[in-house]
Image (spheres, rainbow, N blue to C red):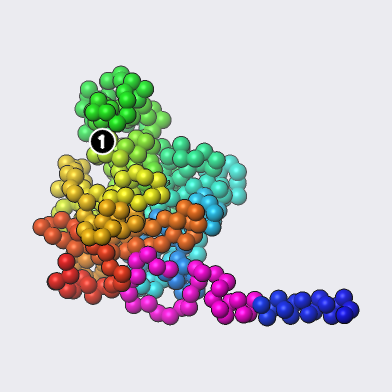
Amino acid sequence: MTSNKRKFSLLLSAIVLAVAISASGFSNELSAQTTPLNSFKPGEIWPDDNGVHINAHGGGFLYHDGKYYWFGEHKGERSNAAFVGVTCYSSVDLYNWKYEGVALAVSDDPESPIVRGCVIERPKVIYNEKTGKFVMYFHLELRGQGYTAAHSGRAVSDNVTGPYTFLGAGRVNAGVWPANLPEAGRTATITPADVRSGTPAWRAAIANGLYIRRDFEGGQMARDQTVFVDDDGKAYHIYASEENYTLHIAELTDDYLNYTGKYIFVAPGGHNEAPAIFKKDGTYFMITSGCTGWEPNAARLLTAPDIWGPWTLHPNPCVGEGADLTFHSQGTFILPVQGKKDAFIFMADRWRPRNPIDGRYVWLPIFFENGLPVLKWFDEWDLSIFDKTDTL
Ligand code: DGJ
């Protein structure tokens, strides 16, 4: 065979092989056919309009002008670091999602806090009625610094799908005391080095501002996070602070772009991550997780009659098999379903740290028993579940 013929024959074989592989569906286990979906299948591959598994982990959801938008962490196959940014998908029915592209892109500028290779987690977008702007909050860890930065990142856009402009990132509420920390907690001199962690004394010290004092000047840590807009238009940033030991709820300015300086700490020493919140009949419900890295643990439930508390801890809202591990997932958002009364979806991630792109989504309907949310597993369900009365 002449060299040209050999090249041609090799090329032909390669093409035949590629076609055969792709026809067999072997090429990418994360892609599937695009047939319209009409149910949720928690934990399974969820194809977008291109037949590709949705890549929007730690998601945040926004309903705007008749459409739902899903913002999430783009993940690759090996690392949890951000090499693309925050992705956006849209849907009118919550089952079928159209890929809208990258809403917030990582930067190529090595000086930028969101340089490619940083960690961007749990993005959430809210819409400001007064300014007409979409505001994104996310957890940012600086490139190469593990999880030590614990920064809150902000970005803004005139369009829901983006592109979002990065506004800045940093610790939160520097030089400001939380409204619920008594004077004694502001002036105490005990430091984390003085108490053995896990002891009752340590827990009491946390409730008395142990870490808040430590981080007072530089600002409070902000890791797992969500943003909540109340009925009166006021918005709140809720995040795991104080080395993940304590949650903070911080009020945002009227334009949602900054903090007013009013904040409280919640469940001191409770080790809560993954806050997701909703409001029903005047009560605030927050479902969180414990702190076990990427491994699932039992969800927690907190309620309050007012965003500023008092917050009361209740037993795990999950029931049935898998309840002690939140059905092998960790919450990220609670979405009120449009057009249905008291219909809320608990949205969670089933992380796959060894192949993050293959992380799965676990969405479950929230039921109420004695006024408290209850979560149970369904292999498959659809929105008509909210119209039934006998599902518990
Ligand atoms: C659990 C958090 O909920 C995730 O968002 C992520 O930060 C992992 N920990 C990292 O271990």
Place of residue 16 in the rendered image (x, y in percent of width and height, measured from the top left):
68, 80
For the point 32% across and 29% down, which residue is it? 197
* Residue 51 magenta: no
Looking at the figure, which quarter contains the C terminus? bottom left
Q: Work out whether 80 lies above or below 101.
A: above
For the point 27% across and 28% down, which residue is it? 199
Looking at the figure, which quarter contains the N terminus? bottom right
Place of residue 298 in the rendered image (x, y in percent of width and height, measured from the top left):
28, 50
* Residue 24 magenta: yes
Residue range highlighted in magenta:
18-45
Q: Name the residue furthest top.
A: 189
Predominant SS of the magenta segment:
loop
Mark 1 crowdedness (10 Å alpha carbons): few <14, some 14-19, many ≥20: many
Place of residue 175 in the rendered image (x, y in percent of width and height, measured from the top left):
35, 29
Q: Is residue 72 visible?
A: no
For the point 89% across and 79% down, which residue is it? 2
- Residue marked by disc 1: 268
Place of residue 201 in the rendered image (x, y in percent of width and height, measured from the top left):
25, 25
Q: Name the residue furthest front.
A: 321
Q: Is residue 2 visible?
A: yes
Tell me the amino acid under the disc marked 1: Pro
Location of residue 390 by image quarter: bottom left
Q: Work out whether 348 lies above or below 149.
A: below
